[in-house]
C-alpha cells in the first residue's frame, strides 16, 4: 500500500497522522507550513452575536485577546475546531459537519458574526449574514524537506488551497514527476490550486478529515 504524506502544519499534522494510522495507512508527516499567532485586538463584543471559527488554529492562536470575547457563542466548522474552542474557554453553540457554507446556511440569517481566522482564509460563500473577518494567525512556509523526493510513489493529503499551490511549486522545483504522485484534496479549491498532471487526484466529499482520509485510503490502496 502506498504511504500517505501529510503536509499540513502542526499540531494538526500529527492528529491527521494518528487517524490515518488507525485506518492502517502508513502516514508520513512532512509539514510545509508552521502556524504563527498574529497580533490583533478584540473588538467590542456587543457589536456581534457570535464567533465564526473555521479552523482549530484560531482559538489556539488567539491568545489573551480572546478572553474579551468569551461571552459570545462560537459557531464551529467541525468537531476539531469545536474541541479547540472549548479548550480555549468558549461556549460552542453549533458544530458543522459539511463545511463552513453548510454551517452558515443552518444559522439564523440575521446573525452578526466575528470570523476569527488565518491570513489566507477563504471568505464564506454565504453573503446573507454580516461577517466581519479578523486575522489571528498566519502560516509561514517552511523550507523544502531534505527527504522530499520520497513523495514519488506516495499519496499526498492537502488541507487547503495554499497547500495545493505550495505542494505543486515544491514538486516542480525539486524536479519530481507529478505523474508518480497521487493527491487527496480536502476541497475542490485545494484541488484546483494543485493543478494537473498528478498520477491521481481525488476530492473529499465534505471538507473534513474523516472524508479526506477516506479518499486517501482508496488512493493508497491503488497500485503504484
Image (cartoon, rainbow, N blue to C red):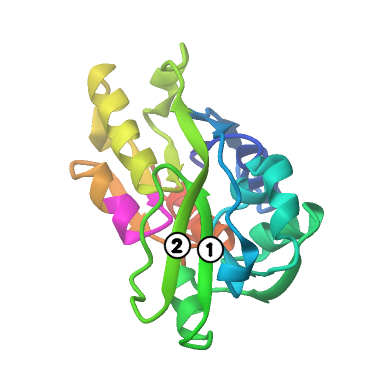
Specify the segment rendered in magenta: 184-191
The residue identified by callout 1 is 114
Judge by depth and name the residue closer to the eye, 65 or 5.
Answer: 65
Q: Position of residue 140 (x, y in %)?
A: 46, 27
Residue 51 picture quarter: bottom right
Q: Where is residue 208 in the image (x, y as percent from the top left)?
A: 53, 62
Please check the rendered image and state whether residue 187 is part of the magenta-colored stretch, yes or no.
yes
For disc 2, the neighbor class at 10 Å (few under 14, some 14 to 19, many from 20) is few
The residue identified by callout 2 is 132
Q: Position of residue 6 (x, y in %)?
A: 52, 38
Residue at left 34%, top 51%? 190
Q: Is residue 5 above or below residue 192?
A: above
Residue at disc 1, secondary structure: strand
The image's mark for residue 205 is: none
38 vs 122, left or right, is right
Instruction: First in sequence, mark 1 or 2: give its number.
Output: 1
Quarter of the image with the C terminus is top left
For disc 1, the neighbor class at 10 Å (few under 14, some 14 to 19, many from 20) is many
Q: Where is residue 132 in the image (x, y as percent from the top left)?
A: 45, 62
Are the residues flagged by discs 1 and 2 in contact, CB closer than 8 Å? yes
Residue at left 43%, top 40%? 156
| 3D distance between C-alphas at marks 1 and 2 | 5 Å
218 vs 62, left or right, is left
Judge by depth and name the residue closer to the eye, 158 or 82.
Answer: 82
Q: In this view, does 31 lie above or below 79?
A: above
Judge by depth and name the residue closer to the eye, 18 or 3.
Answer: 18
Amino acid at each position: 500500500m502506498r504511504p500517505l504524506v501529510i503536509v499540513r502544519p502542526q499540531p494538526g499534522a500529527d492528529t491527521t497522522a494518528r487517524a490515518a494510522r488507525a485506518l492502517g495507512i502508513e502516514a508520513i508527516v512532512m509539514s510545509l507550513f508552521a502556524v504563527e499567532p498574529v497580533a490583533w485586538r478584540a473588538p467590542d463584543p456587543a457589536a456581534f452575536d457570535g464567533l465564526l471559527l473555521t479552523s482549530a488554529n484560531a482559538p489556539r492562536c488567539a491568545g489573551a485577546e480572546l478572553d474579551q470575547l468569551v461571552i459570545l457563542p462560537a459557531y464551529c466548522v467541525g468537531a476539531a475546531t469545536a474541541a479547540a474552542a472549548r479548550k480555549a474557554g468558549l461556549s460552542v453553540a453549533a458544530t458543522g459537519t459539511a463545511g463552513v457554507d453548510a454551517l452558515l446556511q443552518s444559522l439564523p440569517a440575521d446573525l452578526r458574526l466575528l470570523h476569527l481566522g488565518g491570513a489566507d482564509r477563504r471568505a464564506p460563500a454565504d453573503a446573507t449574514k454580516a461577517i466581519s473577518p479578523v486575522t489571528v494567525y498566519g502560516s509561514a512556509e517552511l523550507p523544502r524537506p531534505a527527504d522530499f523526493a520520497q513523495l514519488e510513489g506516495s499519496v499526498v493529503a492537502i488541507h487547503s488551497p495554499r497547500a495545493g499551490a505550495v505542494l505543486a511549486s515544491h514538486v516542480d522545483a525539486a524536479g519530481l514527476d507529478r505523474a508518480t504522485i497521487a493527491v487527496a484534496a480536502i476541497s475542490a479549491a485545494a484541488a484546483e490550486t494543485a493543478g494537473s498532471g498528478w498520477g491521481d487526484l481525488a476530492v473529499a466529499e465534505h471538507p473534513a478529515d474523516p472524508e479526506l482520509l477516506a479518499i486517501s485510503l482508496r488512493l493508497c490502496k491503488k497500485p503504484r
